[in-house]
Amino acid sequence: MRAIRPGRRDGMKSRCATGNGVRRATATMLLAGVLAGAFVLTAQAQQLRTVTEGVYSAEQAARGDEVYQAQCVTCHGDPAEGSVGPPLAGDRFLPYWSARPLLDLVDKIHNTMPLQAQAPLSRQESIDLAAYILQAGGFPAGDAELTGAALAGIALPAVPTASIAGGDVPVAPAANLAQVMRAIAFPASNIVFNVQIKDPGADAPPPTGSRSFDYVEWGATVYPGWEAIDLAALAVAESAPLFLAPGRRCENGRPVPVDRADWREYTEAVVEAGRAAYRASQSRDVDAVIEVTDQLNDACANCHKVYRDVGAEGRGVGSDRCRQEP
Ligand code: HEC
Ligand code: HEC
């Protein structure tokens, strides 16, 4: 029972990328799970505001600026660059405070700054300083002042971090979403889909140098046969969380809707499908992998139906992709 991949109007090989795969009972059940999950996550999200929502006033930041110039600037400099002390804005500051409540930041200032100070800061000064730091970091002012009572309910933005050489360094998106899909999801999935028409166990590596710029052929001489399927399945599973990276934009400039619960669920379904494909590939059983290609196809297509193949279709600026209200 080998499935045949349908053609693709814009030239894509992948069944997954077509989004016109047959809907099955399992896909419907998956969708039901998605909706249930969406409810829970939305309820949680309402409790925490983030600093992007105008949580302090401009007057308050000006007060904080005055204190900053008098008591902090010698050690922290222009807040984004730091000096004796670390920077208090930007890429070398935000990852450390990722998703933490403003209360932590104000406590840090109030309890430990200025370093070795004779006279401690008042609570109000510490809060005003936090407002100034937010302003320096480019977070917008709003109408109301930041109050002590609100601090625990407001979070700094979540920043993805990867541990490199024992430290946390920010991983800022380098690609737009379409590029991530084309660069990683598309080739990796297609290698798995290829098992529908080609038995990796019977695959003879192409003669070296036959088409040296075709990375699939060249790579197949290095990691041939089933190992290529193993690695592609792992690439699908490991790379899908990149769809959730904060700060990534779609090709049309819209922010990727990473905060939406259904977006997260669709992404998790790809991680699951990638793991399942790996397990199937490890069985070295062609039919087992073909079975999983349906799961993988649905995982990609379910999201595409809602967020990609919508409204004003097509690529780039002016398209309706990634719109927030499906
Ligand atoms: C004498 C130098 C000095 C002065 C003055 C000073 N700081 Fe610091 N600050 C430091 C050093 C050093 C660190 C890093 C060690 C630590 O976290 O305690 C730091 C850390 C911080 C941090 C944590 C940053 C991070 O990412 O870890 C904040 C926030 C901060 N300072 C705010 C302030 C504010 C606001 C003032 C002015 C009221 C101030 N500091 C005055 C030296 C100073
Ligand atoms: C969570 C939602 C989501 C999932 C899951 C998802 N995609 Fe996408 N995909 C999108 C969106 C949205 C776009 C449009 C991106 C843009 O325009 O920047 C896209 C674009 C693409 C493109 C680019 C099409 C073009 O314009 O050239 C390809 C290829 C693609 N996806 C393949 C895949 C594959 C393969 C999978 C599964 C392994 C997958 N996608 C999973 C949402 C998703």
Image (cartoon, rainbow, N blue to C red):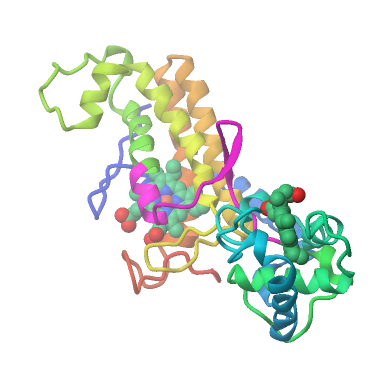
Residue 165 included in the magenta stretch of the image: yes
Residue 80: which quarter of the image?
bottom right
Q: Residue at x 38, y 41 (%)?
A: 184
Q: Residue at x 51, y 47 (%)?
A: 171
Residue in the foreground of this view, choosing between 22 and 295: 295
Residue in the foreground of this view, choosing between 320 and 70: 70
Q: Which percent across, then down, holds residue 320?
A: 41, 70
Q: Which percent across, then down, holds residue 62?
A: 70, 82
Residue 181 included in the magenta stretch of the image: yes
Residue 123: which quarter of the image?
bottom right
Q: How many marks?
A: 0
Residue in the foreground of this view, choosing between 302 and 133: 133
Locate residue 62 relative to residue 224 in the image: left or right. Answer: right
Q: Is residue 232 visible?
A: yes
Q: Which percent across, then down, holds residue 257?
A: 54, 62
Q: Residue at x 85, y 75 (%)?
A: 147
- Asked if 311 appears above or below 190 in the picture, the reply is below
Locate residue 71 relative to residue 125 in the image: left or right. Answer: left
Q: Which percent across, then down, holds residue 321?
A: 42, 66
Q: Is residue 20 visible?
A: no
Q: Residue furthest left?
A: 210
Where the N terminus falls, by quadrant?
A: top left
Where the C terminus falls, by quadrant?
A: bottom right
Residue in the foreground of this view, choosing between 127 and 201: 127
Q: Residue at x 48, y 28 (%)?
A: 277
- Asked if 220 appears above or below 194 in the picture, the reply is above
Tell me which segment is drawn in magenta. 156-183
